[in-house]
Structure formats: C-alpha cells, structure tokens
Amino acid sequence: MNKKIRLATTLILSLIILSLHTFAAFELPQYGGKINARSAVLMEMSSGKILYSLNADTPYSPASVTKIMTVLLIVEAIENKQIAESDIVTVSDTASKMGGSQVYLKAGEEMSVGEMLKCVLVSSANDASVALAEKLYGSEDSFVAQMNARAKELGMTNAQFTNATGLDDDGGNLMSANDIAIASRELLKHEEIFKYTTIWMDSIRDGAFGLTNTNRLIRFYKGANGLKTGSTSKAGYCISATAKRDGMQLIAVIMGSETRDIRNDAAKALLDFGFSNSALHSTGAELLNDMPIYAANKQTLKIGVNSNSILTSKALSDKIERKINLTEDLKAPICAGDTVGTVDFIANGETVDSEPILALEDADRIGFTGIFKKLFLKMLYV
C-alpha cells in the first residue's frame, strides 16, 4: 500500500514539474505568435516601429516599471536646469517610510540627485523615487500630476499614475505595453541615462551599502543597456528590456509573466527576434545638398530628412538602393518642415519604404524691390 502511495505521489510530482517546464518553454515569437505574458511589445527606437505586439493597448499594473516615467521627469528637469545631478536631496519622513524595494533612507539623510537616480535605476528604490519627486515638485502628489500630464503629451493613451513608485496596494498605476515602450523610447533619447542603467553592481554611502541591478539581462544578454524591471503580486513580473547591436536600439516590453525567469526569457526572445530579422539602413542624409529654389529671397534651400536611417528586413538590407526625388522648379514661399521631395528605398524593383525630404528653413517669395536689388547688384559687379 505504501509503495502505491509513493508511486502515485511520484507520478503527481512529475506531472507538476512537466507542466511548469512546458509553461516556461515557449517558441521564439513570430508575427501573431504568443509568449508567456499578459502583454508584450517590441519596438525599434529610431523609427518607433512596432516589430511585435501582444495585447499591446490593454492597461495593466506596471509595478516598478512605473519608474521609467519617474526618471524621465527627473532627467528632463536636469536637462532644463531645474535641478542638477549634484544637487543635494534631504530625505523626508514620508520618503523614508515607503517600504518595498528600498535603500533604507533615513529621514534627514542627504544624498545627491545623481546618487538617488542610481538607487532608482539599479535597485528600484521606492524611497529614493519619492525623495526625488518631492525634491522636484514639493510633494509626490504634485509630481504624479506632472507624470500624468507628460504621459498625455507623449500619447500614452492608456496610462494613469497615482504614485511615483509603482506600488499597487491602493489600486496603483496603469500602463499598457505600448505606453511603456513610448516612455522608454523617450527616456533613451537622454543618453546620459546609460551611465546608470548599465551598472551591474555598485554602492552608496561610501561603499557601505551595496547595489545590484534588478535587471539580470545587463550582465547576461549581449548589448543590454537597460532599462527597468518590476514585480508585485498584482502586476506579475514586468520589464522594459533595452539592448543595442550594430547600431540598432530595441525596446522589449513584457508585462505580467509568472516568474522572473519566464519574464527574462520572454524579453530575450523578443530581442533575439528583432536582432535576427531587422536591420537599420542609412537614409543617405549626408548626400543631400542644398536645392535650388525660384522666386525666393535666396538662391538655394537647405534640406534634410527626419532620420538618418530606416528599419528594414534583414534579408533585404544588402539589396536596398536609394532614389532621391526632389520637387522640380521649386518656388517660394516655403516654410521649414514643408516636404520638398522623397528618398525612396527600393529592393527587387519594389519600393519598400520612403522618407520625406524636408525644408530646413523658410524661403519667402521675393518682391519687386528684391528683384530690383538683385538686378542692380548683378549689373554693378558685371
């Protein structure tokens, strides 16, 4: 009888282990495929193009991935000289009592903005997040109002914030995978952030307190350079994982995986998919010279394109040819930003993409006085 019980127990345990293994072993994503998460997005940064999505516009609790938005406001404030990385933050009683992930700041303790940013981005410190929010706008509530306003400006249509940390005991924040990708893309435009997000291990308080990055991909994935992890019982395991190879920066967002390892495997799978199937191709912006313009107060017009590269299929990247098409007999008036031509990208005889060529300056129509002046000067120097 005991042998039968042992046999049955062994069989049940084997089935449980097998089911867990099956859940974690997902295939590399393809368009329309599924991964083990509530939602996911893969975005190429320079173009903002989405390479893969799963429930991308459904809002969920983002946990500490919220802090991407928190850090964005701090970094923008540094760039706008509202604060400086060297400024000292005095920790409030409120910030010192945040709980969750923290670096155990004490009320009255002083630390620089830069050190606190390191605590937020490496160790996901809730206490440092609130201390920074209070430093910039006086209170966390005022800071959160700015988070919501900035999210609206960026087109994060499903995002709403109630705190600067991602703690969700009180209902908390909501973001979609698309929202997180948009916020991540905006933060990555500030390249100084990489000096924090690429740290694997560091310390604060003159080496007395160690920090280890919550994002294991920084150490174990080639090209990884950020960005932010998060997990709560409500949110599951989330990440915005960023990596750069061969000049291409990808953003992989995973929301609601069941474990840290499943989340990390999903992020790696998305990044592998992007690097294996996509490539950047130069727009040839450096080849564009000033173009002639007629009936204007100048002889030529400065022109350019919005991007120095386009995203293409990797299979086509070595077959693409550029064709520059400029508007013939361009006449004033022209305003900066007007389209004056296109750069077409052709592979196997078909146009696979097109980038508008834009005027980089205004050109006013020349009047009678201007024409007379030009003629007079021409005769004077003949």
Image (cartoon, rainbow, N blue to C red):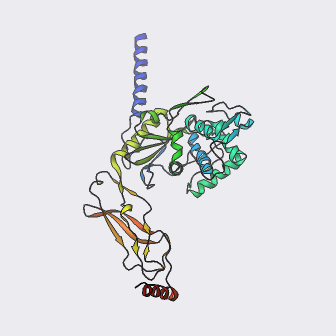
The residue drawn where x is 69% and y is 40% is: 89
How many labels sit on residues? 0
Residue 140, image quadrant: top right
The residue drawn where x is 25% and y is 64% is: 349
The residue drawn where x is 60% and y is 56% is: 152
Query: In this rendering, is residue 199 above or below 341?
Result: above
Q: Nearer the viewer, residue 234 or 100?
A: 100
Q: Position of residue 290 (x, y in %)?
A: 40, 70
Query: In this rendering, is residue 89 above or below 357?
Result: above
The reply to whether residue 228 is in sight is: no
Q: Position of residue 6 (x, y in %)?
A: 42, 14
Q: Position of residue 339 (x, y in %)?
A: 44, 71
Query: In this rendering, is residue 360 above or below 2?
Result: below
Instruction: Judge left or right: residue 309 versus residue 62.
Output: left
Which residue is outermost to the top? 2
Image quadrant where one finds the N terminus: top left
